Image (tube, rainbow, N blue to C red):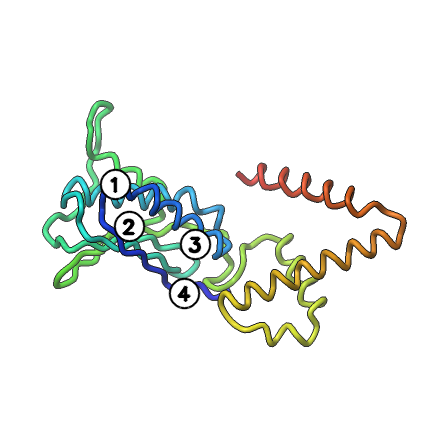
Amino acid sequence: MTRRPWELPFLAEPEEVAGVRRLLRLHLRLWGLADVAAAAEICASELVANVIRHVGAGTPSTLAVEMNGTCLRVALRDPDTRALPSLLSAGPHDESGRGLVMLDAVSERWGVILGAESKLVWCDLATPLSSPDGHVNDPRVSKGEACLTLHLGDAASSLGEGRIRTASQQKAAIGLIVDLLHWLRAHGCDPDEALELAQVRFEAELSQVG
């Protein structure tokens, strides 16, 4: 899966935060990084809040997401090169200073890149990826990919790239599931029961990961 850099321009307003988080969550799901979405949303929220607090509401901003090695980089660009973020210790009753502390807590590292007319505040989040364009380092996923590759045969090399490839792989995975349902039926098993049991097991395994 090719994870190309993605940007989302918006105005830094409190009412925009929910929409930014939602689009970020959807994009990470397309990238196969749903497990990192919660931490990424926290970082995005705090970066936007930092711009609103120190630069001003309505500031034109851009959320930028890309891979940095196997880490997910979440960054926010704004036009103010003077208001530089700093890590402050916030007391229990302080109304500010918590955002970057939270950013520092959930990320592997963070920093600031100053440009001539803008600054970029970024943070890197750990992911379970084995490579920037690979899948999560999970033996179950590896076994699934091996089965899918075998099912596709020679067609595996002509699936296209990006979203086209992902859509083709999804279609092929559905085809593999259908073939397995036919196999179950041919061997006297109930396909509906098998699907239900598989879904229950899948959700149970997801809850253990979460």
For the residue labelled by badge 3, is the local secondary structure a helix, a strand or a loop? helix
Q: In the figure, is residue 201 to the left or right of 122?
A: right
**Residue 87 image position (x, y, % from top left):** 21, 41
From this view, report whether residue 63 is shown above or below residue 99: below
- The kind of residue on which mark 1 rests is Leu
Quarter of image, res 16: top left
Q: Earlier in the sequence, mark 3 or mark 4?
A: 4
For the residue labelled by badge 2, is the local secondary structure a helix, a strand or a loop? strand
Please identify, in this view, whether the residue under mark 2 or under mark 4 is nearer the observer.
Answer: 4
Quick one: 172 or 150, which is closer to the camera? 172
Q: Which residue is mark 2?
A: 110
For the residue labelled by badge 4, is the local secondary structure a helix, a strand or a loop? loop
Q: Which residue is mark 3?
A: 27
Please identify, in this view, whether the residue under mark 3 or under mark 1 is nearer the observer.
Answer: 3
Q: In the figure, is residue 39 to the left or right of 104?
A: right
Q: In the figure, is residue 140 to the left or right of 56?
A: right
Inter-mark Cα distance, 3 to 1:
24 Å
Q: Which residue is mark 4?
A: 4
Inter-mark Cα distance, 1 to 2:
9 Å
- The kind of residue on which mark 2 rests is Trp
